[in-house]
Structure formats: structure tokens, C-alpha cells
Image (cartoon, helix red, strand yellow):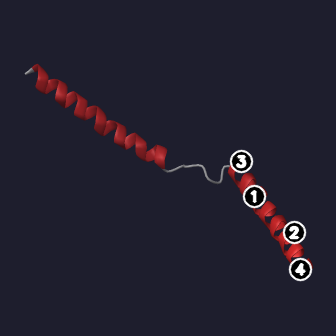
Amino acid sequence: MNIIYLLLAVSLVVALIFFVAFIFSVKSGQYDDVYTPSVRMLFDDEVKTKKKETSKKSNQ
């Protein structure tokens, strides 16, 4: 029975270490998205051209 308590304590310590490592990596910016803003710029141009085309069709 003592081994179960020991394994529970060890698993809690390991889980706490991984949780602290995760928090540290998120705060250091390791999961920041650097790819999407550069691609989003391309999609914004397509939406604006569609709006202009529809406004031209409505004027004719």
C-alpha cells in the first residue's frame, strides 16, 4: 500500500513539472502564430475585390 502513495506523489510531482514547463513556454511566446498574419493579408485582398465587383454590377 505504501508504494501506491509513493507513485501518486511521484506522478503529481511530474505533472506539476510539466505544467510549469507548459506555462513557461506559453509565456515565452513559443506557441505564437507567426504564419497566419502573413497569409491573412492575402485573403483580405480577395474579399475587397469581390465587394467592388458586386457594387459595379448593381450600378449597371
User: Mark 4 or 1 closer to N-term?
Assistant: 4
User: Mark 4 or 3 closer to N-term?
Assistant: 4
Amino acid bearing label 4 = Ile
Q: Nearer the viewer, residue 2 or 16?
A: 2
Q: Which residue is disc 4 drawn over?
A: 3
The image quadrant of residue 11 is: bottom right
Q: Nearer the viewer, residue 5 or 22?
A: 5
Q: Nearer the viewer, mark 4 or mark 3?
A: 4
35 versus 7 height, above or below:
above
Amino acid bearing label 3 = Lys
Task: Measure the C-alpha gap from mark 4 to mark 2.
Answer: 10 Å
Residue that appears at 65% across and 54% down: 30
Quadrant that contains the N terminus: bottom right
Task: Measure the C-alpha gap from mark 3 to mark 2.
Answer: 27 Å
Q: Which residue is disc 1 drawn over?
A: 19
Amino acid bearing label 1 = Phe
Q: Nearer the viewer, mark 4 or mark 1?
A: 4
Residue that appears at 76% across and 62% down: 18
Local SS, label 2: helix
Q: Which residue is disc 3 drawn over?
A: 27
Q: Residues within 10 Å of mark 1 (few under 14, many from 20)?
A: few
17 versus 52 height, above or below:
below
Local SS, label 1: helix
